[in-house]
Image (cartoon, rainbow, N blue to C red):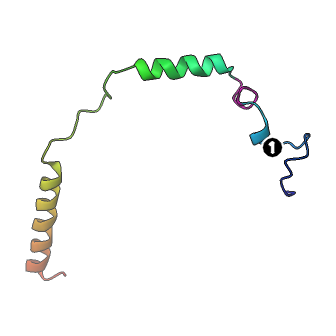
Amino acid sequence: MGKFNSKKPDQKDRMQREPGIISGFSDEQILKEFEEAMRNTSPLPLPPPPENEFNQICRRIERENRMARIDGSV
C-alpha cells in the first residue's frame, strides 16, 4: 500500500469520501436515526445489579481464598 498523499484527488482513501458514500445512507437518514436513538429513553432489558454486588463478590472471593488455605491447596 502506497503512502497517503492528500494532494492526489483520485486516491481511494475512505477519509476523502463522503460518509453517505461509505455507509450507503444519506446524511438525513443517519441524523434521523441518531435523533430517534437520543429520544429513546427505554431502559435496557437487563435488570440493574444489586447495590451491594461489589461487596458480595469480594466476600465470596475472600471465603474461597480462606477455604483454599484450609485445604492446603495454596
- Please name whichever residue, 69 or 55, is drawn nearer the observer in this view of the structure: 55
Q: Which residue is drawn at 39% across and 19% down?
A: 40
Q: Indicate whether 5 appears above or below 63.
A: above
Q: Which residue is drawn at 22% across and 36% down?
A: 48
9 left or right, relative to 69:
right
Q: Indicate whether 14 appears above or below 74.
A: above
Predominant SS of the magenta segment: helix
Residue 20: % across, % down: 72, 26
Q: Would you identify the image quadrant in which residue 45 lies?
A: top left
Residue labelled with disc 1:
13
- Please name whichever residue, 35 or 25, is drawn nearer the observer in this view of the structure: 35
- Please name whichever residue, 53 or 73, is drawn nearer the observer in this view of the structure: 53
Q: Magenta segment, which residues? A: 19-24
Residue 3: % across, % down: 85, 58
5 left or right, relative to 33:
right
Q: In which quarter of the image is the N terminus?
A: bottom right
